[in-house]
Image (cartoon, grey):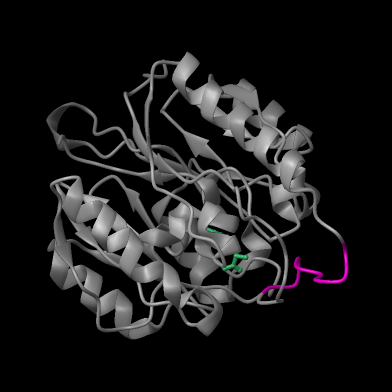
Amino acid sequence: MRIQQHRRYLMCRPEHFTVSYRINPWMEPATPTDTDRALSQWQALYDTYLDLGHEVELIDPVPGLPDMVYTANGGFVIDGRALGVRFRVDERRGEEQPFMDWFAADGLEVVRPQAVQEGEGDFLLVGQAILGGSGFRSSPDSHREIAEVFGREVVSLTLVDPRFYHLDTAIAVLDPVEGPGGVDRANIAYLPSAFDAASQRLLAERYPDAVRVSDADGAVFGLNAASDGYNVFVSPRATGFAAQLQERGYNPVAVDLSELLLGGGGIKCCTLELRGAR
Ligand code: ARG
């Protein structure tokens, strides 16, 4: 039995979306992008969330910050507290302050970060713990920092494949539900080959029921998925993953963000979860 949970998300309309620099292997500045197409695909994701009863907040896009559509990199929010981000790459540092300003205006307590980290791109809340990614963008120091800021266990994982440079490209959180009596029923899906051997062992021990996704589904960004505990918003190209989800009682909802993949982002990248009521 799967339980749909209410979600409050932050998104950013890709009005200024383009690929003008290359900070991950998916980005090819020489290949033209179609901003109108990005906008209509993004709109379909936005409408899908609303149709299913979720709340979506919007942050104003800033000209000259084409990656701002990937709001997952804007922060990490739990219990009314928002940790801001510090991007590794200069191209995105202009996004840091607008996101912190948005959190403050929303009434969240804002914590300005010290260490380099890219928000929910590399930090995922699973049950009571935070999974933290490093290897490409967020620094190991940021794992210690976020553990202190939120007073939670942080499980550090190392990414090794440059195509999967953020943790949310290699792990999807399917079910953050806490079972009765504090039993952690949280579950994830992941792409084993995106991690080093130690991280693979850790994931296998900690999440024996996890969905292990094939390299083929990983390569089409299938793991960059959002879930409300029942509906899993996933790329239509990740057909094997969708079948695995269905077998386990989830409802895969296909949303095509192929234009945004030209920037190296997908469904989860465009979705920041705001946890804790306003
Ligand atoms: N072009 C962006 C970057 O490389 C894409 C970010 C994708 N976001 C994510 N949460 N994985 O920073």
- Whole-percent x, y for residue 236 in the image: 75, 32
Would you say 206 lies left or right of 45 here? left
In front of the other: 231 or 208: 231
In magenta segment, residue 112 = no
Image quarter hosting the N terminus: top left
Q: Which residue is more in the foreground, 2 or 273? A: 273
The question of residue 27 being in magenta is answered with yes
| x and y, in percent, of residue 168 in the image | 52, 56
Q: Is residue 273 above or below residue 72?
A: above
Is residue 89 in view from this perspective? no
For image coordinates 70% across by 60% down, the residue present is: 18
Q: Is residue 145 above or below residue 46?
A: below
Which residue appears at 68% of the width and 45% of the height?
A: 222
Q: In this rendering, is residue 105 above or below 27?
A: above
Image quadrant assignment for residue 94: bottom left
Quadrant in the rendering for residue 256 = top right
Residue drawn at (62%, 21%) of the image? 246
Q: Is residue 152 visible?
A: yes
Reply above or below: 256 against 130.
above
Of 65 and 183, nearer the camera is: 65
Residue 17 x %, y %: 65, 55
**Which quarter of the rendered picture does the C terminus lie within?**
top left
Q: Residue furthest front?
A: 63
Q: Residue furthest right?
A: 31
Q: Quadrant of ligand 1?
A: bottom right
Provide the major secondary structure of the magenta segment. loop
Specify whether 3 is left or right of 164: left
Locate residue 230, reporting x and y percent. Answer: 46, 22
**Image: magenta residue range:** 24-31
Question: Going 72% across and 71% down the picture, which residue do you hit?
Answer: 20
